[in-house]
Structure formats: structure tokens, C-alpha cells
Image (tube, helix red, strand yellow):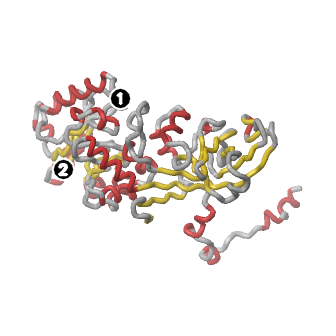
């Protein structure tokens, strides 16, 4: 059996020679076979920033582009926002800041996780600004400033009630009571983060704001920032000197129980692999969790949980869309495929090779999908995988980035 298997045609396929590999189709030529496309409207992102500025009465507005701009492509997003006037960006990690620098060569890039030992040189080389949240980080940055013989830019993060990152009240006052503790730091910003800004009536918002106001009195000349995406909509008392939105830029609703005032940014579309007319009582997908209640037209799409499309979204919990029609997602979400009920479309209207909207467009919105999955829009966007073709476009001009 072993010899016969070794001699089978499948085992006789020769490896591709390096010279022949050069003549194979390259990634750009393979896009026609892509399984799904994620369209990102850069003009909508810029419009959302403008909306936030309007809500805040013209206040300066930074952009949080961590996690690859919530999965939408940090370099393209930041470059578009820079063209729209944004000159301050926030990332989580130093490597995100390094990758971003070429796209926004003159902008201020703040690194929310601060500086870690061994990263000081790279932080300086790329002109990144650490958001210092522990006494140890402050000491690392002070020592680097002393060695360079010049003040280095920094921001201070204060914990006002989230118990996550930020100097505690005790740590902050210990630093502020002795000016030498901040020697060598060119403080550009003092900030804190709201824990429940999407809940406008949550009393913790006012408590955090009041504590932030009290703490920053010790640094009255330093610009301050408290308002994240939802915080922008809490009112002027929360705005201070700089807005710091992330999710709102990408069209996620600032409050789940109110109409979304923001433009939709993303549309995820998946290729139709097959269309079948099935009789009633036909099990569809793994474990037969869905059974056609009547004769049904079922389309299989090239998208699954390996692409970040949550497995919990199967069995008619959300809708895909095509040609203005909602197409319920039926059956279990599998690794690389989902199935939708296209019975509402005329025969022949949906064909193999067509693209069906799965998020946005004719499909349900990011926020509706997040609600169905028991999560938030942030997770839906950041989970979207690397197998998509990402297309950044300017909707107002009809051109690709």
C-alpha cells in the first residue's frame, strides 16, 4: 500500500522551480479570485471626525488608530485624516507608531502603552511620544532625557476610576509635589479614560470628570484630554482641550440605545460560491442546525469564522444583503463559508461569482451585528481577518487610495 501511494499522481507533483515561480500570477493578478472584499470609505471617516468637532464646538480632535485603525488599515486611514487636518494620532504599541510614521511624517504620534526598557532609542528615533502611566515609565523616560541632554516629549495618563492604566492619585501627587520628578519631560498632554461614557446617565462619568479636574489643577498649563468616542457626546464639561475618539471615527454608534449620528464606513462583501434550489426540510450546514421550512434558494458565500466573522452569527440572527434585499444568514457559520437564504430574489438574479454584502451596504450594520453576537462593534471590526482584499476609497471623489 505504501509503494502504491508513493507512486500516485498526487505524490508525483514536482516542486516549482525558482525561475518558473517568477512567471506565476502575482498577488495583484490574483484579486479576481479573492473570497471577500472589505471596502473602507475614507471620506466617511473624515466626515465623522468633522462631526465630532462640530459636536464639541470646534475643538481639536485627535484620532485613535491602534489595532491597525480597528482593522481598517492604519496607514491609509491616518494619511486620509492628516489630509483633512488631523495632526495627532494615538496607537497602543511602539511598533504601531513606527509603522505609522511614514504615513504621517510631521504628526504627533502618542503611544498609549508608554515606554518599556530597551525601546527608548526607537521611541526617540521615530519621534514617538510615550503616554507615561507608571512611576517606572517616568523614570525610564527621565533617564533617557538626561542622557540626551534635552527634554523629551511625553504625556501623562492619570487613573480617575478605571483601575487599568494611569498614575494613581497617590502616585500623581507624589510626583507633582516635587517638580524635579518631572525634570526632562516636555509634557504635551495629560489624559484619563472614561470607563462608561456610552452610558450617559452612569454616575461614574461625573465622578471621573471631577477627579480629573481636581488632579490636573497641579498641571494647569498642560493641555488635557478626557473624551473618548462616546465621551464627546457627554457635553462640553468632558471635552477639555483635545478629543480622543477611535470607534466613532469608524462609524460605530456612540450609544447603543440612540440613533447613530455617524456615517457608515465599512462594507464587507463575500463571493458567492454556489447557489442551490433546495426542497423543504433540507438540513443546511454543520449539524443541520437549520432546516429549510419551504423550498428555498440557498447561496454559499466565501466567508467564515477564520475571517473573523463570529460563529454566533448563524441561524438567521443577522442579515446579509444583495440588490436591496435582506438575505438571512442560515445554518452554522463554518471556518470558510456561510450560507444565506436568497429565496426573496428572482430566479437567476444571484449567481455564482457575485458578491453579497455581509456587513454594511445592503446587509446589517456593524452595531446590529455586534448586538446579535453579544459583543460591541469594536470587536467586530478588529476581528476581521487578513484574507480580505481591503479597498480604501474616497466616496466623494470615486478614487482608490
The answer to whether residue 135 shows anywhere in this view is no
Residue in the image at 64% along x and 37% along y? 316
The answer to whether residue 334 shows anywhere in this view is yes
Number of the label disc, if any, that sits on residue 196:
1
Give the quadrant of the N terminus: bottom right
**Residue 183: which quarter of the image?**
top left
Number of the label disc, if any, that sits on residue 313:
none
Name above or below for residue 254 compared with residue 87.
above
Q: Nearer the viewer, mark 2 or mark 1?
A: 1
Name above or below for residue 324 compared with residue 158.
below
In the rendered image, residue 280, in percent from the top left (x then y), is placed at 80, 39
Give the quadrant of the C terminus: bottom left
In the rendered image, residue 307, in percent from the top left (x then y), is placed at 58, 48
Depth check: give the residue in front, 338 or 349.
Answer: 349
Q: Residues within 10 Å of mark 1 (few under 14, many from 20)?
A: some
**Residue 21: which quarter of the image?**
bottom right
Count of picture labels? 2
Q: What element carries label 1?
A: loop
Classify residue 156 as left or right of residue 290: left
**Residue 350: which quarter of the image?**
bottom right
Name above or below for residue 224 compared with residue 265.
above
Residue in the image at 33% along x and 62% along y? 102
Classify residue 333 as left or right of residue 67: right
In the rendered image, residue 198, in percent from the top left (x then y), is placed at 37, 31
Q: Is mark 2 on a helix, strand or loop?
A: strand
Residue in the image at 49% along x and 59% along y? 391
Nearer-N-terminus badge (2/1): 2
Number of the label disc, if any, that sits on residue 152:
2
Depth check: give the residue in front, 294 or 176.
Answer: 294
Amino acid at each position: 500500500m505504501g509503494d502504491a501511494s508513493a507512486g500516485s499522481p498526487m505524490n508525483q507533483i514536482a516542486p516549482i522551480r525558482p525561475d518558473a515561480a517568477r512567471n506565476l500570477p502575482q498577488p495583484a493578478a490574483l484579486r479576481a479570485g479573492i473570497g471577500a472584499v472589505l471596502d473602507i470609505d475614507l471620506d466617511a471617516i473624515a466626515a465623522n471626525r468633522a462631526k465630532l468637532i462640530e459636536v464639541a464646538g470646534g475643538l481639536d480632535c485627535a484620532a485613535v488608530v491602534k489595532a491597525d485603525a480597528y482593522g481598517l488599515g492604519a496607514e491609509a486611514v491616518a494619511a486620509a485624516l492628516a489630509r483633512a487636518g488631523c495632526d495627532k494620532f494615538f496607537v497602543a504599541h511602539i511598533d504601531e507608531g513606527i509603522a505609522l510614521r511614514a504615513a504621517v511624517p510631521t504628526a504627533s504620534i502618542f503611544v498609549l502603552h508608554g515606554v518599556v526598557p530597551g525601546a527608548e532609542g526607537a521611541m526617540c528615533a521615530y519621534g514617538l511620544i510615550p503616554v507615561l502611566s507608571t512611576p517606572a515609565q517616568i523614570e525610564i523616560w527621565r533617564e533617557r532625557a538626561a542622557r540626551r541632554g534635552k527634554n523629551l516629549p511625553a504625556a501623562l495618563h492619570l487613573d480617575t476610576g478605571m483601575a487599568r492604566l494611569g498614575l494613581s492619585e497617590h502616585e500623581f501627587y507624589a510626583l507633582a509635589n516635587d517638580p524635579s520628578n518631572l525634570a526632562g519631560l516636555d509634557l504635551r498632554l495629560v489624559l484619563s479614560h472614561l470607563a462608561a461614557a456610552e452610558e450617559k446617565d452612569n454616575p461614574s462619568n461625573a465622578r471621573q470628570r471631577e477627579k480629573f479636574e481636581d488632579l490636573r489643577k497641579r498641571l494647569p498649563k498642560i493641555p488635557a484630554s478626557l473624551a473618548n468616542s462616546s465621551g464627546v457626546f457627554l457635553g462640553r464639561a468632558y471635552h477639555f482641550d483635545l478629543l480622543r475618539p477611535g470607534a466613532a471615527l469608524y462609524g460605530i454608534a456612540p450609544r447603543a440605545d440612540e440613533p447613530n449620528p455617524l456615517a457608515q464606513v465599512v462594507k464587507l462583501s463575500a463571493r458567492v460560491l454556489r447557489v442551490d434550489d433546495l426542497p423543504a426540510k433540507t438540513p443546511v450546514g454543520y449539524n443541520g442546525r437549520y432546516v429549510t421550512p419551504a423550498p428555498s434558494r440557498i447561496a454559499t458565500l466565501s466567508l467564515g469564522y477564520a475571517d473573523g466573522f463570529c460563529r454566533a452569527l448563524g441561524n438567521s440572527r443577522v442579515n446579509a444583503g444583495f440588490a436591496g434585499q435582506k438575505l438571512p444568514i442560515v445554518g452554522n457559520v463554518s471556518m470558510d463559508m456561510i450560507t444565506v437564504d436568497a429565496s426573496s430574489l428572482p430566479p437567476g438574479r444571484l449567481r455564482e461569482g457575485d458578491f453579497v454584502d455581509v456587513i454594511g451596504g445592503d446587509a446589517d450594520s456593524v452595531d446590529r451585528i455586534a448586538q446579535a453576537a453579544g459583543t460591541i462593534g469594536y470587536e467586530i471590526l478588529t476581528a476581521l481577518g487578513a484574507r480580505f482584499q481591503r479597498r480604501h476609497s474616497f466616496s466623494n471623489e470615486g478614487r482608490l487610495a
